Amino acid sequence: MVTDEVDLRHPTHSQLVSCVGGTNLEIQSYQESIERGDRILFCTKGVYRPIPAKSLLEIVSQRGFPLDKIVTQLIDDANSRGGPDNITALLVEIH
């Protein structure tokens, strides 16, 4: 989870530490309780680097809009802030 406390300027912030298909893949797992209506955002650093965590939360938490429109808003927001990297986002809502 990315928070405002993460120092994204640290020299190793974007270091690739594991990948599918690579050697010595180390699986990382986290447990969180999820409930109906919760949303999970999977995204690249092209989304979470330029958009502050508080703004990401506000955008993803919008109700009454289709998820694809919210993802489009995230992508447009990241691009408007310079689009510094690959911009990919997937938003899932638990039903």
Image: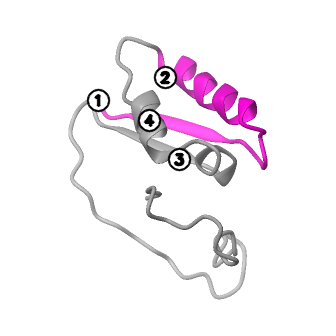
- Label 3 vs label 2: CA separation? 13 Å
Mark 1 vs 3, N-terminal side: 3
Q: Which residues are magenta?
A: 66-95
- Secondary structure, mark 1, is loop
Asked if labels 2 and 3 touch by Cβ distance under 8 angstroms, the answer is no
**Which residue: 63% across, 23% down?**
72
Asked if labels 3 and 1 touch by Cβ distance under 8 angstroms, the answer is no
Q: Is residue 35 above or below residue 72?
A: below
- Secondary structure, mark 4, is strand
Mark 4 vs 3, N-terminal side: 3
- Label 1 vs label 3: CA separation? 17 Å
Way the structure is coloured: one colour
Q: Amino acid at mark 2?
A: Leu
Q: Amino acid at mark 1?
A: His
- Secondary structure, mark 3, is strand
Q: Is residue 9 left or right of residue 4?
A: right
Q: Is residue 70 magenta?
A: yes
Q: Amino acid at mark 3?
A: Phe
Q: Residue under circle 2? A: 67
Q: Residue under circle 3? A: 42
Q: Amino acid at mark 4?
A: Val
**Which residue: 56% across, 38% down?**
90
Foreground: disc 1 or disc 2: 2
